[in-house]
Structures are given as structure tokens and as C-alpha cells.
Amino acid sequence: MQIAIPLYDRFTALDAVGPYEVLSRLPGATVTFVAHRPGPVRTDNGMLALVADAALADLPSPEVLMVPGGWGTRAALEDRALVDWIHTAHETSQWTTSVCTGSLLLAAAGVLDGLEATTHWLEMDGLGELGARPVQRRVVEQGRVVTAAGVSAGIDMALVLAARIAGDEVARAIQLLIEYDPEPPFDSGSTATAPAEIVELVRSAAAERLAAAG
Amino acid sequence: MQIAIPLYDRFTALDAVGPYEVLSRLPGATVTFVAHRPGPVRTDNGMLALVADAALADLPSPEVLMVPGGWGTRAALEDRALVDWIHTAHETSQWTTSVCTGSLLLAAAGVLDGLEATTHWLEMDGLGELGARPVQRRVVEQGRVVTAAGVSAGIDMALVLAARIAGDEVARAIQLLIEYDPEPPFDSGSTATAPAEIVELVRSAAAERLAAAG
């Protein structure tokens, strides 16, 4: 099974690597990182580059498409070649999926028209403006389209997907192999549980960063 | 604050990227991926390469050292230059940390002598043979040495570390920003909760893989 993860400037590494770590362990799966051109693609903070091993044009019809998000998503919405590639790949994919603001790219490609979908909690409005019906759940399944909430939610999404593709036993084995028995030291991972002042802190810092990025 | 993550052939990507995603968001932090030589380093399944931006020799004394694990750890134990770099870096580091079998490398470098430490559940015996006192907990703190269990445990470890370095408020804000509100679809992430047949399945598959690798 051919699984493609497109990379673009200023994506968020964990959005891509969480699902990769789960899906690469599916029997018979090959995960390929793709970009306009093969070569390194740098993440949102500039501190890391992942290597795309193939060009988008080399993989026009993967069986699974997994689109990460990141601070660079807004700029990527204007990237016609990337959005067109997603649109075309979705025509023949078995599963079309996203993590975080990756769903905005799915929406721009017309994949989410009228469908429920999720994204990072800071981008719910933006997702609605692009034609999806935003819902604040960790993983949202709509037939063969599966979207996940922010960054770390890709691990949960990929385990759900692994179970759909290969059955519960395989998904459970993968969960055990990556020892995914989460134990966050705080209960602060969603706007429902984080203290209000933390939510405001993150919201204002994000607004500043988006403003600075123009 | 300079944070170094050493990469070596056949490391596990999520071991490195989970902590990177948390620690890179600490105010004033710079995360640098290092290896023998700058350039791409390929993961355990060969499907992904991360780029090391600096050589080990370029960063002899990072303030935080974070060593990932992977199927390549066993071979890396014989890599004197890497083990010596860990040993020397630990002499001046504020924090020396690991994820998964990365703790075997800490042990080989003499960092864990007589200390409690953890690792991937499949490698507990190996950790003990290298001089540590293995304990099956998700995150083990021993002064400035912090070790995490398998693969995904690095996210929990890095949040604990973020709180120690920058305080609970910053750690909570990072948790919210990466929306770490885990919701695994199964309760199968540890040997205590996974069905016995799944534990045996994973154990025998891992034994086969290790045998095949020689």
C-alpha cells in the first residue's frame, strides 16, 4: 500500500511523523514523503528538515494521502500545484487524511465540501470559510476522508486508520510497539481542559506570530 | 538554550520528533540535530531521512542532550565516537535525556551507572545489562537525567522537562499548542493493558527482526 505524505515549507514535523510512525508499520505499507522536488523541506521553526524522497509528480495516485499542517499552511493554500495534486490524488485514493491545519489544504482542494472535518483549535473558523463543517473532535471520519485535530492528534487518527485498513489486532500491535500509553503531566491539551489564562496566552501568541508573518 | 538531538542510522523518527516538537517551543530554545557529519540520516524502516544540521564535534557541550532510540541502537552501542560524545556532553549538560532505547546509549556512555532508568518494554533486560536499574515507568527522573519509555513516551518526557526548565505555565501552553489531549482508540499501549496475544505477537515479531538484523 502506497502512502504519500506531502511536505511544504514550514510544515509541523510531528503532524507528519506521528502518522508516519504508525502507518509505516502496517504490513505491506510504503510511506513516501513527497514535495515539489525531492530534497530537504524545512519545518515551521526552521530547526529541522525532513527529506522528501520523491516529487509530487512521481506519485500522482497514492492509495493513502496524509496531509500535515503547520504555520506554513496559509501560504501553501496559494500553492496551486500542491492543491491540484491533492485534488487529483483524492480522486483515486482509498483514504484521504489530514492532521492539524492540513485539513485547510484538503478543503482548498475541494475534498471537504459540505463534510464535517476538524483542524487545530486555533483554525476552526478558517476551516469553515473554506467550505467544510468544522467540528471540535479529535478524529473526524467521513467515509474515506479522515481529519485530525492539532499536531499530536495525528497519532490517534493514524491508529484509527490502521484499524480500518488492517484490523483492530494490527492497530493494537502497532500501539504497543510504539508504547502509546499516554501520560501527559498536565491536563491542558484542549481548550476544554486548559486553564482559561493558558488558552488566552496561546491565542494571543499565535495571533502575534500570524501578524508578524504577514 | 542549546538542545542537541544526535541522530544515527536506523533511529526511530518519533523518538526524536516528539521531544523536538515540545522543546523547540521553549522560550529561547534552539534545537539542533547532530550526527557524525551534517546531512540526512535515515530512520529504521528506511522510509524517511531527517537532516542533521551540524556535526557532533560542532556541539560538544549542549545544555540539553536528548538521545532517541530505534532498531539501530544496538549497532550504535559500538560507535565509540557517538558514545564518547554523549559521555563528554553529559559532563557539562544541564539535562541529559533519552527516549526508548536511547537510554541504552546513555548507559553505554556511563551516564546511568546505578541509576533508575527506563526504555522500550522490549529492551528492559538490555538496559540492566549495561549498568542501569531498569524500571517500567513512562518517565523516570534521576536528578538531571531523565529517561522515557518507548517511542511516543518522548512527548510526555519532554513536557515534564519543559516544566522543569521553564515552569508549569509554559509547559501547559506548549501542551495546548500541540493539542496533546490523547485519545487512543484502543487501550493497548503497554504490556499491562494490551491483550496477552498482542504482547506475544509483538514480542515474536521483534525477536525475528532482531535475529534477521544479525
Image (cartoon, coloured by chain):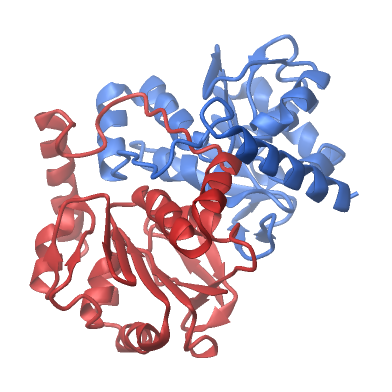
Chain colours: A blue, B red
User: Residue at point 29% right, 62% down?
Assistant: B147
Q: Specify the quadrant of the image occupied by residue A21.
A: top left
Q: Is residue B9 above or below residue B78?
A: above
Of all residues shown, which one is farthest toward the right? A214
Residue A204 in the image, given as x and y percentages of width and height: 76, 42
Of all residues shown, which one is farthest toward the top? A114
Residue B134 in view: yes
User: Residue at point 24% right, 31% down?
Assistant: B188
User: Residue at point 64% right, 18% down?
Assistant: A117
Q: Indicate left or right for A138 with A136 as reference.
A: left
Residue A132 in the image, given as x and y percentages of width and height: 73, 16
Q: Specify the quadrant of the image occupied by residue A29.
A: top left
Q: Please name whichever residue, A60 or A68, is drawn nearer the observer in this view of the structure.
A: A68
Q: Is residue A149 above or below residue B110?
A: above
User: Residue at point 32% right, 40% down?
Assistant: A180
Residue B47 in view: no
